[in-house]
Structure formats: structure tokens, C-alpha cells
Amino acid sequence: MTVRSMTRSGAPGVSAAGSFWRQFRRSRQGMIGLAILVAFGILALVAPLIVDPAQFSPVVARTLGNPQWAPPSEFPPLGTDHLRRSVWAQFVWGSRVSLTVGLAATAVTMVIGTAVGVIAGYRGGRLDSFLMRITEWFLVIPFLPLAIALASVLGRSTRNIILVIGLTSWPWMARLIRSQVLTVKQRLFVDRARSLGAKSGHIIRNHILPNVSGLILANATLWVPISILSETTLSFLGLGNPGNPSWGKTLEEAFANGAMTRNAWWYFVPAGLGILTVVLAFTMVGRTLEEIADPKLGKER
Amino acid sequence: MSEPVLVLEDLRVTYRTSGGAVPAVRGVSLEIPAGGSLGLAGESGCGKSTIAGAVLRLLPGTAEVSGRVLLAGKDVYELKPGGLRAVRWTAGAIVFQGALHALNPVQRIGDQIAEPMLVHQTVSTPKAAKTRVAELLESVGIPARRAAAYPHQLSGGQRQRVLIAMALACDPQLLIADEPTTALDVMVQAQVLELLADLRRQRDLALLFITHDLSLLTTYCDRLAIMYAGRIVEEGPSGDVFAGPSHPYTRGLAAAFPRIGDRSSRMAPSGLGGDPPDPAALPAGCPFHPRCPLARPECREAEPALRISGPERRAACILV
Amino acid sequence: MGSALTLLFVVCFNFFLFRIVPSDPLAHMLRGRNISREVQDNLRAAFGLDQPITTQFVYYLRETFRGNLGISFHSRQPVWDEIVERIPATVELLGVSWLFAAVIGTAGGVIAGWRRNTWKDRLITSSTMTLYSVPDFWLGIILLTVFSVVLGWFPIGGMQSVGVRLQGFEAFLDHLRHLFLPALTLSLAYMGEYTMVTRSSLVEVMSEDYLTVARAKGLRDKVVRNHHALPNALLPVVTLAALNLGFILSGAIAVESVFSWPGLGQATAEAIRGPDYPMLQGLFLLFSASVILFNLIADLLYMYLDPRVEAS
């Protein structure tokens, strides 16, 4: 058997993806979550068609002649805020920012975490101990304080928020991926490939990564809600970008401007529900993916 | 002869799974007289361990049980929860396979042995329980002071002895030993079995000994029952059955006579080709026919019932 | 030993973290103030900012280990004094929440895990998942709006009523009324973790043979659960609770702001606004140190609770 043909049989190919989808379709939880995500994904994509972000400038909002603090009954569908801006517009735009940050931050986490985890797990030895030492150090540093410190040093921008979340949450991923890589490495075919003279890069690409990809995908999906919640908290603490309002930023402005004491619920309820729904949906999809990637879990849940 | 301590009448156990109903035990009837011993043998998956659980009604909720189980004259499946608890461990106790997790890892072994005595009030005070634990431990060859040890501080053989001591705590009439020595090495295995035999003689215990190791049963049991695919296929006095099997399956098992110490031969008797059938998809007719060297066309048609094959012997094969 | 090394790592990391972006901290501090060049240079010298970075680092290490965390840009007070003043409020709020979250969350997990796939389990699991998906401060905002603004049952914020002088028991009651909503918010936010960990740990333990043995002995279901299942299943939960004590200082950064609770969380939020770098640096160090300390305690506790783990 040649290395190439082993690759074919060892790696999940097109048919594997098909069976993955068949299994996924059977899960009610997963399909509901996916439907919600598709809906919000579409909303986020078409947001620029519905909303012109220029209207978030207080000056522009004033020239539009909107009322201030208008409840939804007066200014459908979701009323206005202290600066006469439409809450609906902020909600739509916020879905775009929150989803972008959540996905991009998770991507950063995955790239760093997978790189460290695969290298540590595959190479082993001293490099592994060194990388895992560093990982453990970062693991004990409490996430939110670190993110806050980093974000306040880097300055307020959407890009920085993405970087901060990615840079602070990779250690979990690295540790998880490493243990998976170790398991895969134990299996015969890697040794065989190596004994047949395959290069490390080739083995990692063709043998290790395809076998941990299901798990990476499941964990990435489960990491997006954590990223979204982190973004929300950082934005609420004033570390977000005011010109590109996310749901968290909306909540911060609502809170800072006394929407609670005015009982202007329309200002802070939609953004919170948006976060709740999207986070829940990602969790549902992620757990379904995890159950398919690791069938042992399904029985326990 | 006195009243039998255990009677199974047409016991059937079916597991409900997502893939449909899986029959594990398909109509087993047997009897163990007071002080008697029966060895139940068969390959893994034949349903023998399910029987052990069924006697004390310990099977999971997914198991559907029909037929009757009479333990010390009481119909176990007719008992109310309180009555069931009263029968457990006093009428019949189980010696579990101790290698894995039969002992609670965070409780001292003395407390675990004393627990059933206190629950069933076979001793009146915790102090009396302590004395009794010491006696029991000594009787299985463990120094009484080890009562304060945690399971992980004992060797595999010692843990198995603890499980025997625990099973004896309430002086049961019947001991069910479910593969009690599988995970032990040969020397320890022999010691544990000798201990079990001694205790049985001293206390006039009835024994249901379940194992896949046919050779053990012939030494330690009066009678033998061989199970295949959820049914008893042969039954009789152990010496006779072993010396002259009536059923081809028993012949296969006996031919594979596993020599002590040879693990692989115990795991997969070499006298038999092929694998045990999947209980969810049993072959039509006699379930053994695909592996049977003597199979005939009519074996595919109907499953043979047990019939007399000699003095006190029965077998389920059309060739008998 | 490992913990000491980790702590040293955090102390060093803290120094460089706040210097990854080249900036002049003094410019922040003096923003908007008309101060002569000379005074600025003097200040720079006083803070050691005219020294090369290695000298600064040595100076930082020495002072940190002496307990000197620098001067707050905002209040001009020593950071350490500012922090110490705020600790009791935070410890009180999070201590109460920690306790309720651990007790109620664990109880929920036990109920859900022991009777898996019943309606109780589904209810508990789905509400836990929902609570998990809500930002804690938003939950606080909702509770505050409903119970304080609309219903008027609880005060809007702070630790005690201002403008009235209350004594003895009345003052205590008043304080409890202020504590209630933030503590409820944090309890709800932290409960889910305990429920999920307890449930999955119990589910794992339930397949163990010693539970079958316990049942075979004729024990009642409740005894099987309380004497055999839980002592094993709760081991990871106890560790989790100990670990979470490490977050007793940093666990309510956003929620404290919502309820104007004058603790370390609010101090953090204020320091972000500055940004008050020395303050942020001090808080970060303290938060990390507390997590490291309780990591160590959790390890020791596990060793004590689980007889299988021998002290090495």
C-alpha cells in the first residue's frame, strides 16, 4: 500500500462529508441551531443594504428628524435611543459586527491553537514540553482581565478586539488539539507513513489534520459563542469601536445613557436577545457536531 | 430434597435499544438446590451475565424481563421495592468481578463490607459490624487491620477476596459468582477459587458460577449448563458433560480446554471456528448451525428444544 | 514550586504586556494639563521613565515584590491602597454568589444527572444552556430594570442607601437589599457551570460497577446516590468550586458596574475609561495571583479528598 492510497482511505473525503451531513440532519437540536444561524447570517450579510452606518453619527441622526427615546409604538420597529438613532438599525448592524468578531476571533484562536497543538503533539520531546509549559502559564491567567489589559493597551478598534480574543484564548485550543494529535499519532498509519519516508509537513497535512478536523470544526463552533460573549463584555466595558457598533456596544451605550432608569427596554432588550439567540444556536450546532465527531458523547447527553 | 434456592422459569430478557429489541436471554429454566452448585458457561455475549443481573433484578431500565425468578421461594419480579431490598444480599449475593470498579474507590473496604449488615440489621451495632468485618476478612485471608484500607491500596487478588467477604456479609443462601477471576493471574485465580470452594463447604452455600472457562466449572460445580445465544444448549452433571458432551457446541468448548495460564485460549476457544452470533440478528433455525461442523440442512429450519440426552442430562440438538 | 514559577511569569508578563505598544504613559497622565517641560522631565525621572527598559524592568520587579504597585494616574494614590480599599465589597458580593451558585448549581446537576432524560433533566439542562448563553451584565440589566425600576422592590445600585442614616439591624437589612440583585445575577450566571459539571460527572459515575454492587446490597436508591455515587461524582465539582474561588476578585467586572457596586470590578471599569495603566496593571497582577493561588489550593484539596491521589 502506498502512502498516497493510505491517505485516501484514512482521510475523510467527499463521501465522509456527505455522511456527516446525513447524521447532522437527524439532530433536531443541530438543525434548529443551523436555521437560526443561517437567518442571522443572511441578516448580517445584507445589513449594508438595510442600514447606512453613517446614521449612527449623532449629527446625521438629528438631521433625519427622528424623535428621541421613542418607544417602538412611535418609531417602529424598535424605537430610538438618546441620540435619535434607530434601534432596529443598530440591531441589524450589530448582528454583522458581533458575528464578524465572533467568527474572526475564533479563526485567530483556531490558527494559533492548532499550530501550537499540532507542532507540540507531533514533534513531542523538548519542544512539546516547552510549548505546553507556555500554554499552561497562559491558561492560569484569567481570561477577562488579560483581555481587558491587552485591549486597553492596544486601543479601541474592532480589529484589536478580534486580536485580543484570539490571543487570549488559544491555550485551551492548543491543549485540546495536542491531545487529539497524540491519539492520532498512536494509530498505525502515521508510523507506516513515516517509515515509508514521508516528510513531516506531508504527514501533518495528509494524516494528522484530516483526522482531527472533525474535532477542530466542532470546537471552533463551540468557541464562537465564547468569542461573541467576550466581545460583548469587552464592548460593554468601553473597549469596543464606537463607529462600528456591535450588540455589546449598543448595550454599553444604553446603560451609560440611563436607558434602564427610563425603562427604555427597547434599547437594551433586542441586542441582549440577539446575543442570547446566536450564542445558543452556535452551542446547539457545536454540540451536534461534537456528538458526530465523538459518538461516545451522544450517549451521555 | 429441600426446596431449591434458585429457580428460573422460562426467563427471557430483551434489551430495548435504538436499533430495536435485542434478545439477550431467550427462555432459560434452571434450578439450584440448597447447597448445590451450578456452572454456567458460554462465550461472551451469550447472555450468562445478564442472568446474574436478572436474579437480583439489577438490570438497567432498558431490559424487559419475563418469566419467573424464584429466589429462596420468593418471586423476585413480584416483590415490592422494600421486599426486593430485603431479599438482595440476604437470600442471594453476588461476587462481582473485582478487577475494574466493583469497589467504591473513596470508601474504606471495611465500611463497604459492613454496609449490608447494617442495612439488613444482621448485626445490631456498628461495633458488632466491625467485629464481623474482621472475621470475614480473616476468613478470606486478609489481615483484619486492612479494613481501613482503600481499594486502590490492595492488590487485584486481595480486592477479589474483599468482594467475596462482602458477598458473605449477610450469610446469603446463594452466591452468584460472575466471572470472579477473569482479571487475575493464574496463581491468584487458583487461590481465590479454592477459597470459594472452602467457604462453600463450610457454610453450605449454593453457588451459581458464571464463566467462559469451562475447565474451572468441572472442578468446582456439581452441575453444568452451557449457554449459546441466550439459551441453554446442554445441561447435566459436570463430570459427565465434560467427559462426553452431547451438543457439538459443548464439544467445541471442551476441545478448546483452556490450559491454565494461556490467556488467548480462554478468550477465544480454539475448538470453535467463527464468532458468536450477534444477538440482534440470530441465524434462523439452530443459532449454532453456521459454526457447527455437523450441521445438516434441517438445522436451518427450526431451533431444537432441550431433550433428554442421558441420565440427568439434556441437550438441544437434533443429533441427540 | 510550580505556582511560584507561574506567578513569576505573570509578574514579568505584566511588565511587558503594558509595553507592547510604544507609548508615553506620562502623556496620558498629563493629558489636558498645562505643565512645563521641566516639571514633565522631573516627573519622568521620578517614575524612572528616563531609564532604559532593562533598568525599568529591574526597578519594577523590586518594587512589585515590595508591594509597591505604583501610583494611580487617576487618583494619584498608591494603586495598592486603592485596591485594598475595594477588596471587601467584591469579596462579599462574589463570596455570597459563589456559595449560592455552587450549592444550587450542584443540586440541579444532581437532580438532572440522577434521573437522566426525564422532564426534570430536560428542564434543568435547557435552562442551564440558556443562562450560559446570556452575558452576565445583560442579565443584571434586565433584573435591575424589572425589580428596581419597574417594580421598585430593590434599590437601583450601590451598597447602602445614601442620604439616610440607618443603624444596626436596619442598616444591615438595607445592605442586604442592595446586595440581593447583584448577588442573584452572579449566582445565576455561575450556576450553570456547576450544573453541567455535576451532571456529566454523575452520569459517568452511574455506569460504574460499584453502584450496581451498592444496589445489589439492598440499599435504598437515595443511599446509593448519597453514599456511593455522590462522593465520587462530586470530586471534580469540589475542585471546580475551589478553582472558582480564584475568580472571587475578578469575577464581577461588568456586573459590578451595572449595580454600581464599589468593588474591584467597578475599579477596573473606571481604570479602562482612563486608561489608568498603573491601576490596570495592579488589578491584572492581583487577579492573576488570586487565580494561581486557588489553582494550588484546588490541587491540594483534591489530593486530600481523593484517597487515590497520594501526596507526592
Image (cartoon, coloured by chain):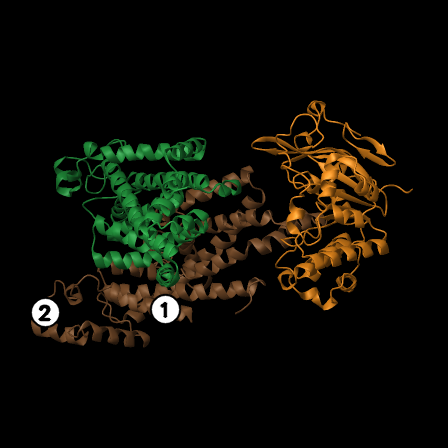
Residue A253 location, x and y as percent?
Answer: 25, 47
Which of the marked residues, 2 or 1, is nearer the chain's N terminus? 1
The amino acid at mark 2 is Ile
- Which chain is the one coloured orange? B
| Residue under the image location 44 percent in, 43 percent down | C129
| Residue under the image location 19 percent in, 61 percent down | C21
Chain letter of the residue beneath label 2 in the structure image:
C
Quadrant of the rendered image containing residue A151: bottom left
Q: Is residue B282 left or right of residue A259?
A: right
Q: Is residue B232 left or right of residue A105?
A: right
The answer to whether mark 2 and mark 1 are in CB contact below 8 A is no
Residue A136 showing in the rendered view? yes
Q: How many marks?
A: 2
The amino acid at mark 1 is Leu
- Which chain is the one coloured green? A
Residue A126 location, x and y as percent?
Answer: 37, 63
At mark 1, the secondary structure is helix
Residue C216 location, x and y as percent?
Answer: 71, 48
| Residue under the image location 16 percent in, 63 percent down | C23
**Front: mark 2 or 1:** 1
The residue labelled by disc 2 is: C35
Q: Is residue B67 above or below residue C300?
A: above
Q: Colour of chain C?
A: brown
Q: Nearer the viewer, residue C193 or B239?
A: B239
At mark 2, the secondary structure is loop
Q: Nearer the viewer, residue C97 or C181?
A: C97
Residue C259 showing in the rendered view? no
Q: Nearer the viewer, residue C185 or B308?
A: B308
The residue labelled by disc 1 is: C7
